[in-house]
Every structure is written in C-alpha cells, then in structure tokens.
Image (cartoon, coloured by chain):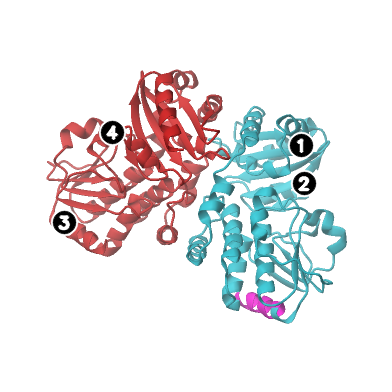
Chain colours: A red, B cyan
C-alpha cells in the first residue's frame, strides 16, 4: 500500500484543478473522503471542488472551510466509488475520464490510470488519513472532522466487523488532532427526528422472516415515505434493522426509490457474503454490507430476493 | 493515578481469598471488571470469586475460564460500585467490609481503606487494563474479552462523550491481544430478540415530551413487561431512546421494578448534568448518564421528574 500511496501523493502534487467524485446516495465516507481531500488540496494552493448528487442535511457541516473556486477541471478523482454506475446522474459526464481512483471496496471496477484500492481499510477515510500523514500535510480540525465522520459512519461507530485495531488507533489520532466527536456522534448515531421514529415504527410492521427465520426483510415503500413525510436523507440506518434480530444471518432492506424500482441493502452477520449475494443482481459492496437495485413490484422483488436467499442459506 | 495503581498492585499481590463485588442490575462494565480481576487473581495462584446479584444471559460468556473455588473470604474488593446502596441484596453482608474499591464514578461514596477512583476513565475496565499492564500479568483472551465488554458497553461502543483517544487506544491494544469483538459487538449492540423489538414498539408509544420538547420521557411498566414477556436482562439499551430524539436535552426512562417503585435512568446531551439531576432523588452517576429510584404511581413519579426538569432546563 505504501508504494501506491506514494504514487498518489506524487500525482496530487503534480496536478491541479481537481474534481472529486463521490457516489450516489452519498454517505459519510464518500462525502468525508471528498471534502477532506478537497480541503487538503485547497490548503496546498490548488483548485478543487467536490462533485456530488446531493449533500444530505446531516452532512452539510462537512463542507465547512471549502472555498468555492472557478476553474475548468483538469484532474478527476473518485473517492469511495466502486463502479461508475454508482455515480448516478454524474455518470454520463465523468465515465471514462477518471484519472485517480481511491477506494476501499474489494469489488472496485473503476477504470483509471492510477488506482489506490485497499479492501482491508474499514473506511475510505482510513486510506486518506494514511495518505495525508505520508504527505505530511496539516490535518486541520475541518479535515479531521471529515475523516472521523467517514470512519465512524462506515464502521457503525466501530461496532461492525470491519473495525480493526488500526481503525481505532487512526480514530484516536484524529481525536487528538481535535475533531468534534461529541457533535458528530450525536448527529450520526444518537439523534433521530420524530419523523424517523415514526418511520421506524412503520418499518418494524413490515418485518417478515424466511428460511427458518435466518433471513429478515423490511420494506420502505414510497407510500410509507409519503405517509410519514420523510425524504432520502432520513432513511439512513434502516438497513441495519433486520440483521439485528436474534438468529438472523442476512438482513434485507427494500427501499422504493421510484415506482417499482427498489434499492436493496443487504447486511450479513459474516457467515454469508453480502457482496456475492448482491452481485447476483448486478450490485456489489463488502462481505458484511452490500447493495443492488431490482425492478418490479414489491411482491415480485421480495420473491426474487427470497429465492436467492434460499439458495445460499 | 500511577501511584494509586501501584498501591493496588501491591495490595493484590499481598492478599488472598478475594471476593469481588459488582453492582446490582449488573452491566458489562461491572461484570467485565469483576470477572477480569477474578481471572487475573486466579492466574496468580490466588483464590477469588465474583459476588453478583445476577449474571444476565448475554453476559454469561464473561465467566469462561473462572474456576469455582472453596474458601473463606479474607479480602473484599468492589468494582464499578459507586455506593454501598448499589450492592442490592448483597449490601447487608458486605457494608463496612470493603478493603479495596476500584471505580470510575466521580460521585463514589464507598468507604474503604484503599480506594482507586478515576473519574476520567470512560469505563472501570480501562482502570483494570492499566493495572494489569502495570502488574505485567498475562492478559489472556478471556481477560481481554471481559475488558473489551466493559469498555465497549460503557461507551455505547465508543459513541458516548466519555470516549477518549485513550479509550480507543486501549481498545486497540485489547483487540491486538485477541478478544472476540465480532461476537461481543454482535451480542451487545447488534442483536435484538423479537421480544425486544416488540418492547421497543410498546415503549415508543409511551414517549411524551415536556419543557418545549427539550425533555422526552418513556416508561416501561410491569404491565408492559408482562404483556411483551420480557425480563430484567432484556431491558438494556432502552434508556438511550428518549435522548435520541432531535432537540431533546435530557431523556428520562422510567422502569417499574416493583409495584409503584421506579428505577429512573437519565441521559443528557452534555448541557445538563445527569448526575446532579439524579442526586436530587438520592441517586448519582456520570454527567451524561445517571440513575436514581423514585417511589409512587407512574403519574406521580412522572410529575415529580417533570417538575425537577423544568427547574433546570
């Protein structure tokens, strides 16, 4: 990894006018990676901006300190993006143009002249922390907040199986730099809107089990979202609910993103490979957490997923 | 602290026939502290046992490797016990007999010839880790599992404000020793029985707000516990629910432990001191998490708590 990081460091120093791509339905790790890298590049006197399909309300604080800059992009970097498909509405504009890909998904399929992929990193922000240390750049409080957000959200605040001793030591170093863990943990892990509470109650009612209760499935339909009055940014965290039920090996969350078009989130307890499961539907991710998209009515999609689960359990 | 730890180390080496006291309604930190210390003392060739009012089902794995031994107690040690009142049914037998008190509650009121209290430690198990390192004892996998359980449960898996960089580094060291974080995190933070899910739905329905929605209160009555069919061991974690609601500064959980006798758990977001609040009712704890007991009907107890909240908010 060190050789790759050195190559990335040299590349960043050499180039200018960066556009940093994050994945669609952006989470803390892709946004934390994007804004941390953007802040560091701007500190280095370079021009940089983050390209994202959205910044959910809870993540807007990550942008603090970013300078809006006018420039024509010369260098395209993707962070935490495993596949061009995951660029969402930005795919068309950027497919085939990525110069540097920094990612922690084993299943990464991005084509780029320079790739830095470490499947052992719990979060992409772990890779960026190591990169910044190697580059000996000043890790400001703003950069630290971004890195901590990425690492803590991708590990469920250090409780998922991807968390390593190194993850905790990196987080400790970032805390020493002075990030605001109290604020970040409160917003990411300790705060629910009243709407979110209402949504959870609705979702609990959709829970069903299959394969001798070793698989649990929940569904968030457009009708439910409308009834409760929640938007995209308030659906985070639901995917961990079905896997939490005692005895469940694989938890599946169906989220209707458009009529008869479902985003599927799969969480596994380790015995089942979630990424392999999602690959059957053209998706990917990690062994413990992965995703895909399936079209059809709620009942059709559920039936397809259940059939696939019964084959592997 | 190092002088105190050296004194504790000398004391443990000198004495024998230990009884280690844990607090009532035992949690991961008091049991983890008790069994870790017991294992280490037995490794040292000494006789030791843990005295506890119960070992909830999820914590039975902590006892692995403990040898049942016949002996007459000569040395009494309390771990994670802030007050003799918290010994529950063991109070009568042990009050006034404690030789060594190891605790991390600032509010500690135990009278003992040797006291080692560090209010800056996120968990009592942090103090024990430092003690064991200082004593250069072999921290086995079993001891590591106990220490990790104590530290992770008292910090909400590293998301509460008591978590420090040192907490994370200690946890990293314990992971390197080889504790089973995947199992422990799954059982402590990622598993809910179906009964627990049903209980949460019931409890959500009792949520009420006061003081301009800055305080949220939930109640678990004996009737609810009976309806859902849950016992003491399945009520962990509920206390964090009301504080999680957006805008809530202080979250209060009432749990009916006997008819018209409520155990109150208070969680604060940091602006309010939960320990000071509970002290008004003869209780104590930490600034962010504290508890007390109040007698009366559900409505009477709620009214008392609301009146007290309105004075401080």
Q: CA distance from mark 3 to mark 1?
A: 65 Å
1 and 4 marks in contact (CB < 8 Å): no
Q: CA distance from mark 1 to mark 2?
A: 10 Å
Q: Residue at left 61%, top 59%? A: B123
Q: CA distance from mark 2 to mark 3?
A: 63 Å
Residue placed most toward the observer, B249 or B104: B104
Sequence-earlier tag: 1 or 2: 2
**Location of residue B45 in the rendering, given as x and y in whole percent from the top left corner:** 70, 77
* Helix, strand or loop status at disc 4: loop
The residues colored magenta run: B2-12
Q: Is residue A277 magenta?
A: no
**Location of residue B60 in the rendering, given as x and y in whole percent from the top left corner:** 67, 54
Sequence-earlier tag: 3 or 4: 3
* The quadrant where residue A272 appears: top left
Labels 3, 1: front one: 3
**Location of residue A208 in the rendering, given as x and y in whole percent from the top left corner:** 53, 27
Q: Which residue is mark 1?
A: B304
To which chain does the residue with label 3 belong?
A
Q: Quadrant of the N terminus of chain B?
A: bottom right
- The total number of labels drawn is 4
Q: Which residue is mark 3?
A: A11
Q: Residue at left 64%, top 40%? A: B238
Residue B120 visible, this angle: no
């Amino acid at each position: 990894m060190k050789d790759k990081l050195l190559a990335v460091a040299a590349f960043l120093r050499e180039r200018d006018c960066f556009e940093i791509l994050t994945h669609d339905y952006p989470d803390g790790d892709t946004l934390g990676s994007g804004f941390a890298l953007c802040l560091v590049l701007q500190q280095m006197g370079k021009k940089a901006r983050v390209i994202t399909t959205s910044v959910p309300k809870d993540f807007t604080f990550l942008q603090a300190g970013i300078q809006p800059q006018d420039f024509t992009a010369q260098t395209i970097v993707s962070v935490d993006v495993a596949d061009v498909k995951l660029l969402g509405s930005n795919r068309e504009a950027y497919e085939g143009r990525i110069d540097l890909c920094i990612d922690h998904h084993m299943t990464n399929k991005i084509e780029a002249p320079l790739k830095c992929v470490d499947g052992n990193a719990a979060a992409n922000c772990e890779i960026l922390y190591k990169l910044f240390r190697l580059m000996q750049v000043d890790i400001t409080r703003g950069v630290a907040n971004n890195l901590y957000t990425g690492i803590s959200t991708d590990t469920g605040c250090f409780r998922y199986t991807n968390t390593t001793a190194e993850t905790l030591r990196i987080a400790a170093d970032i805390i020493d730099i002075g990030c605001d863990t109290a604020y970040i943990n409160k917003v990411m892990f300790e705060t629910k809107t009243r709407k979110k509470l209402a949504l959870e109650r609705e979702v609990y009612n959709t829970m069903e089990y299959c394969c001798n209760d070793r698989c649990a499935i929940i569904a968030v339909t457009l009708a439910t979202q409308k009834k409760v009055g929640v938007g995209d940014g308030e659906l985070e965290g639901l995917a961990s609910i079905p896997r939490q039920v005692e005895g469940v090996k694989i938890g599946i969350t169906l989220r209707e993103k458009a009529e008869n078009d479902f985003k599927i989130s799969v969480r596994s307890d380790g015995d089942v490979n979630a990424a392999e499961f999602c690959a059957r539907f053209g998706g990917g991710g990690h062994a413990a957490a992965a995703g895909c998209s399936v079209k059809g009515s709620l009942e059709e999609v559920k039936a397809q997923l259940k059939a696939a689960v019964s084959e592997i359990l």
